[in-house]
Image (cartoon, helix red, strand yellow):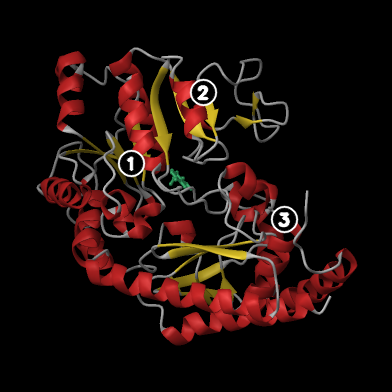
Amino acid sequence: KTSYRVVSDARLVELRDRENRLFLERTPASQKTFERAHEMLLNGVPMPWMGDWGTSHPIFVKKAQGNKITDIDGNEYLDFCLGDTGAMFGHSPEPTAAAVADQVRHGITTMLPSESALAIGSELGRRFGLPFWQVAMTATEANRYVLRICRALTGRHKVLVMNECYHGSIDETLPHIGPTGKLELRSDFDMNPGVPKDALTRVVEFNDVAALEKELAHGDVACVLAEPIMTNCGMVLPAQGYHQALRELCTRYGSILVIDETHTLSTGPGGYTAAYGLKPDFVTLGKSIAGGIPVAVYGFTREIADRINASFGRKSVSDPMGIGGTLSGNMFAIRAMEATLKHVATDEAFERMIAGQNRLSDGLDAALKRYDIPWSVTRSGARCELQFMPRLPRNGSEAKAQFDWELIYYTHLYLANRGILITPFHNMMLIPPMATDDQIDTLVQVWSDCMAELSTR
Ligand code: PMP
């Protein structure tokens, strides 16, 4: 493996020690709280990812508003992580907050539909070009229901995913291609011990049309589940013509095409699908569509709706398909989505977000050039990704091969000590509508200072 780390290992340890000391000085209350939290929370956090920021302890949040987070030590951060997309439009957007404050006093969940459900259905249809919609609680859940439907409709059992993808905590999507070419898990945490990892899964590299055709030709793939841009292994853009080939091959081999827009909604009001004219059978998305209130949706074509109803949809008495959830489609979450789509995730908001991202990426590119650092910036819509490799990766393996965890943790710690948060686990930066040019320039400047110091070698 070629390393594009730039800095020597010894120097990185030295710098990391300095930043660790600074972090401890800045966040004593978070440190104390983290110690106490071990008495009642596994490893001191309510959810494992919260302990994975690479800092000696997590920053405990006092409040988050717009694009700012204040921690319990009183430090203020400019937030470019935004809950890893959940708060893409900023924290607690006012129209969403007002709608949920009203709705919370008029019914939270009833297992009956409200009129807001029609509003979100038609708005999502307008944006994504798909006529029918269903509501789930999380993007993971939306993907899981869609997989079930695709299996039921096709009578096939396998799902095909892209190597190093992420679509939520869904067993079938977690294997990747191991060093020997066989499918294996990415961690030691095996939820189906003894079950061959290729029993329900096929995996191909993104952008590899020949491999895709070879796997689909087996005739056992119920659906392809793919992000239009890979965003969870760094970021990988589709090659020219890839999406067209994906669509054609799915049709040819009778596999249903599911496009997961959970992250790529950041491309525009109708996600990557609308921006680039994709023609999926299903779209799934969650996280940000109600400003971070837990809710997710899946949309599909009339043809799929007809197939569902012809096969099993109308025979239902009580959840015959393993699809639903008592709280799914509750009036509170739907009201939050209605307000967010109508007043927050607007065309104007996306224009500002995308312009801001271009400003950021231009600034980062200039800094890389100035300090002669062989890294690259992948940009798409309102998000960009700084990758420790000289050219843009073509697939998940190439992107993952250049993951340098020590450098990721170090740079994120450096940024945090200077009042900036970016997504943990990789270098994704998302621009919310309220980010000012000055704030974006601050992010560029801090990265630039960090690079200047690293490149002194
Ligand atoms: N799809 C994609 C593309 C994602 O990145 C994620 C989460 N990072 C999910 C689905 C699952 O979302 P959630 O964890 O909110 O269920």
Residue 411 spot, x, y in % from top left = 69, 69
Q: Is residue 146 visible?
A: no
427 sits left or right of 43 in the view: left
Q: Is residue 394 above or below residue 444?
A: above
Q: Quadrant of the C terminus?
A: bottom right
Ranked by sequence position, the earlier of labels 3 and 1 is 1
Q: What residue sits 45% from the left and 63% below the top?
A: 383
Q: Which SS class for mark 1?
A: strand
Determine whether the beta carbon of the residue marked 1 sits less than 8 angstroms from the nearest atom of ligand 1.
yes
Ranked by sequence position, the earlier of labels 2 and 1 is 2
The answer to which of 364 and 310 lies nearer the viewer is: 364
194 sits left or right of 221 in the view: right
Residue 314 spot, x, y in % from top left = 14, 18
Residue highlighted by disc 3? 405
The label shown at residue 201 is: 2
Residue highlighted by disc 1? 284
Q: Amino acid at mark 3?
A: Trp
Residues under labels 3 and 1: Cα distance?
A: 30 Å
